[in-house]
Amino acid sequence: MAPLLIPLDPSYTSVEGFIAPADDRSPDAARYWLRISSIPPGGRSLRGAHLDLGPDLAALMHGHDMLLKSRMKESPGLVSFVLELRSLLSQALASSSSGGSAIPRTADFYSTIKAELECVGWSKVVQLADNMSSLTLRTEDAAGRTHQLTLTFPASFPAAPPATNADLPRQFTPIWRPQTRIRDVLAQFESELERLQRFWDLFDELDASAWVIEPTAPSRSCTYRRVALGSHATLVLKIDPVDPGVLPEIHIMGADRAVDPLLGALRANRGKWQPHCSLKTNLESVLDTTLPSKHADGDAEDASLAGDAGAACAICYNYRRPGGESAAAPEEGHMVVDGGGPGDEDSGTGEVPEVYCDNAACGKPFHKACLREWLTAEPSTRQSLGTLFGACPYCTAPIAVMK
């Protein structure tokens, strides 16, 4: 257990030597000097014993004198204390190497976590850190969707509350009182899930019935969707998770010939939005159109519809320009905004296609940067007042982009 720690007398009232971290058994592991003296005869308790640490070990344990003294008083014997000291040394070294401060946990901390997990039920535990400093729990909502809640415990838990992290559209901060326990936090989390049922139900129905372009694998915290409208036009909507039934923020993008009628319908039909209806039904009502289905004419992922959706730039074939510019504000008339656009945490990074060919037979979308690069290389392109005027790369119809 500690081969370099030896007794100084036959009665084991004093021991001296070196110890290594609990998780390092290599021959060249770092060794730290210590001496434990005045051990009561029989070694069944260290109450009244004296601990001396070498300079290196003392530096690692700096600020935890009271903790070490407490552990010596509570330890059932020498072997138990040395094992715990090696574990604390491992934590201190790991924290030191990561730039943090060593915060060893007491035996009461581990006992509390174990007892509370017995109440919660081990079937709900997804992951538990080796030192019990963090815990991930799993639960289901009323619709059978699985959710996870991660708790990170401070060394002073349960006197201090754990930090929480969950895939939710708004911050979850549980109410914490001195008598609050892990099962109470989980119950509060499940109550929050119940309040968000309508929000997730609306998006799940839209994902299943409409042609959703982005995000391809939405998280439960995502509050927006980009939906194909046909005729190379797309729509982005962002829902308020607190009141998901109200008219959301709506953005319509595409060529003027496709967007203008939709903008007119939206202005005229805003009052038709019904809080109890699905997103697809409401969108079709206020836009006076039929949304393309994910499976057009029964064919899964219809290639012609995917191309018509205008999801990707017709030059680089990406929706978001790799390593490109951040998305600029859309041009006048190409978007209607109720409030503001999707937040950066939802909409991702990189420029999205914002310039569309206005030829009804083409309608291809382009990143501004991609189109600028293309037109700059074309001899027939002309420039006026910071705008490049040239021909569409696909149909040669007139097209322009700001330089």
Image: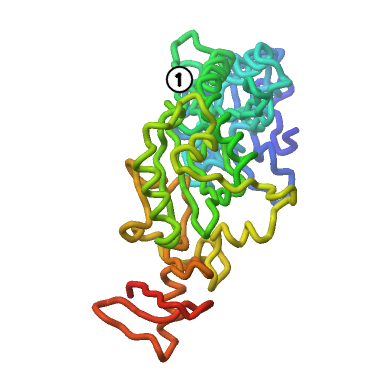
Q: Is residue 202 left or right of residue 303?
A: left
Q: Quadrant of residue 12?
A: top right
Q: How is the image coloured?
A: rainbow
Where does the image place residue 383, in percent across and percent down from the top left?
30, 83
Where does the image place residue 109, in percent across and percent down from the top left?
57, 19
* Badge 1 amino acid: Ala
Residue ranking furthest to the bottom: 379
Which type of secondary structure does the marked residue at label 1 adopt? loop
Q: Along the line of sight, which residue is nearer the eye, 234 or 44?
A: 234
Work out whether 197 lies above or below 367.
above
Residue occupying image coordinates x 48% and y 80%: 396
* Quarter of the rendering occupied by the N terminus: top right
Residue ranking furthest to the top: 179
Work out whether 134 lies above or below 214.
above
Residue tagged 1: 160
Residue occupying image coordinates x 37% and y 32%: 271
* Quarter of the rendering occupied by the C terminus: bottom left
Q: Along the line of sight, which residue is nearer the eye, 292 or 4?
A: 292
Q: Along the line of sight, which residue is nearer the eye, 62 or 12?
A: 62
Where does the image place residue 292, in percent across and percent down from the top left?
60, 48
Where does the image place residue 73, in percent across and percent down from the top left?
57, 15
Q: Is residue 285 visible?
A: yes
Residue occupying image coordinates x 66% and y 40%: 20
Q: What crowding class fits label 1: few (fewer than 14 Cα within 10 Å), some (14-19), or many (20 or more)?
A: few
Q: Is residue 48 visible?
A: no
Number of numbered discs: 1
Q: Along the line of sight, which residue is nearer the eye, 332 or 242?
A: 332
Q: Is residue 209 left or right of residue 199?
A: right
Residue occupying image coordinates x 65% and y 47%: 294
